[in-house]
Amino acid sequence: MGTSRKAEALALLGIARRAGAVVKGTDATRRGIRKGLVRLMIVAEDGAEGQVRKVVPLARAQGVSWTKCGTRDELGAALGDGPLTAVGVTVASFAKQLKQLIGRD
């Protein structure tokens, strides 16, 4: 993914946060997946292996699409927070737009 597409995706993620369409952090993302709220999970490219192992198998088991985008610092900055390993997008329209921008694994 090109730098401009990543920047656009991170900006859209910030808009989604302001719209209340995001859960932040590994634990909140796991809870959101279990409750059936998360439509797309975004994992930091430099996320700690242990944290990634907590969310990716769960997302796969629940049929939640996921992708990697940005570093922990970039994800956190886009959402007005500190470094984040995982973020869950809870609104389908935002999830669709983000998938188009960054693709999915």
Image (cartoon, helix red, strand yellow):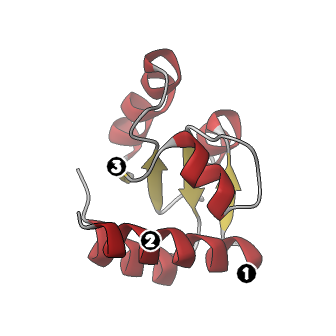
Q: Above or below — where is 28 with respect to 75? A: above
Residue at x 43%, y 18% (from the top left corner)? 49
Residue 3 x, y percent position in the rendering = 32, 67
**Labels 1, 3: front one:** 1
Q: Is residue 84 visible?
A: yes
Residue 90 shown left or right of residue 63 in the figure: right
Determine whether the residue tagged by mark 2 lies in a helix, strand or loop. helix
The answer to which of 34 and 79 lies nearer the viewer is: 79
Residue at x 51%, y 68% (from the top left corner)? 10
Q: Above or below — where is 2 with respect to 12? A: above
Residue at x 67%, y 41% (from the top left corner)? 25
Q: Is residue 33 visible?
A: no
* Three-letter amino acid code of the residue under disc 2: Ala
Of labels 1 and 3, earlier in sequence is 1
**Labels 3, 2: front one:** 2
* Three-letter amino acid code of the residue under disc 1: Ala
Determine whether the residue tagged by mark 3 lies in a helix, strand or loop. loop
Residue 17 x, y percent position in the rendering = 70, 70
Residue at x 38%, y 40% (from the top left corner)? 45
Residue 97 x, y percent position in the rendering = 39, 81
Residue tagged 2? 7
> Residue 85's quadrant in the figure?
top right
Residue 97 shown left or right of residue 83 in the figure: left
User: Which quadrant holds the N terminus?
Assistant: bottom left
The answer to which of 29 and 9 lies nearer the viewer is: 9
Residue tagged 1? 19
Residue tagged 3? 63
* Three-letter amino acid code of the residue under disc 3: Gly
Residue 59 shown left or right of residue 5 in the figure: right
Q: State how far apart marks 1 and 3 are (Cα).
A: 24 Å
